[in-house]
Image (tube, helix red, strand yellow):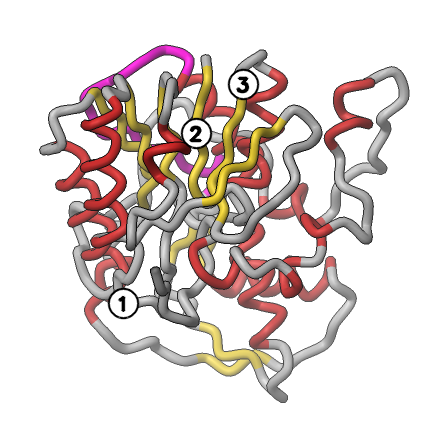
Amino acid sequence: MRILVTGATGTLGSALVPALLKEGHEVRALSRTKRESRANVDWRWGDLISGNGLEDALRDVDAIAHLATSGPKGLGAVDIPGTRTLMLFAREAGVPHVLFTSVVGADRAAFNYLRYKLEAERLIIESGLGWTILRATPFHQWLDRRLRDLSSFPVLPVDRSLPWQPVHTGEVAKRAAALLGAGPESGEIEFGGPEVLNTEDLVRTWLRARDRRRPRLPVRYPGRLYAAQRAGALKTDALPTGVITWHDYLNPPPLDLSGDDFAIEHTASPTSPANQPEQDPDLHVYGGDEGYERPTRS
């Protein structure tokens, strides 16, 4: 299959692209900057909001993995207008299947960022195309970054009443790749991590793994979204789940690539753009799960 990936430079996209390649699919990746096609990835320039470049990017595509999002800071700048534009061009191109990555709880706690994801889901469901919605719990990688940012303060605010069910992006990518290969589900599928932790356990494990010391200040986070999380609306009992725990993500075994030619070819070096997200212009616009920081101009 030839699959177009939006948000290919984001946290999930950078895991999905090699997962699709390993399954034998042809990958076409959308970018707002011109990139040289390499490593079996056909990069195409295109803008989700203006629609520029989408006709070319969607030509002869068998499926779309729509991961691009403006993130919590973007006020739906890509999630809604970008999805609407993508669906218009996808209908014109006759694309048979669109997989959209959303968030567990979007249908139960449509507040803040989640209401944009739910509206984007509606646009895809009503597009007339074959569709699959994959809702995931928070990524290990996202929580790791969030705690790293919070650790710059003298104390860490900890709401012990909040449950978290983190999942590894690699496992979400593997699930998405399988769903793309299987064809449209016409349904919403939830996928979560293997365990539920409270914030105290989450933070304690992180501090130990990152060898940091910070006093923890008990707080109660305000707002309707945290109230919904506290009530369990952002967890899922759906099976299968991921298998990589928070502890195992933070304390991975040494990477052994001996004998795995594919892994060697598709594992980024420490200095590659995939490991330098602050240098990637797409990542700050609509890369996977990042914040939208500047308007898109046609």
| Amino acid on which disc 1 is placed | Leu
Q: Mark 3 Cα within 10 Å, few/some/many (few <14, many 20+)?
A: some
Q: Is residue 6 above or below residue 148?
A: above
| Amino acid on which disc 2 is placed | Leu
Q: Is residue 33 left or right of residue 114?
A: right
* Residue denoted by label 1: 75
Callouts 2 and 1 close, C-beta under 8 Å: no
The CA span between labels 3 and 1 is 33 Å
* Residue denoted by label 3: 26
Residue 207, position as x, y percentages in the image: 68, 66
Mark 2 vs 3, N-terminal side:
2
* Residue denoted by label 2: 4
Q: Is residue 129 left or right of residue 184?
A: left
The CA span between labels 2 and 1 is 25 Å
Disc tally is: 3
Q: Mark 1 Cα within 10 Å, few/some/many (few <14, many 20+)?
A: some
Examine the image and state in which quarter residue 235 appears: top left
Numbered range of the magenta stretch:
181-195
Whether residue 246 is in magenta: the answer is: no
Examine the image and state in which quarter residue 191 appears: top left
| Amino acid on which disc 3 is placed | Glu
Whether residue 183 is in magenta: the answer is: yes
Q: Is residue 294 above or below residue 7?
A: below
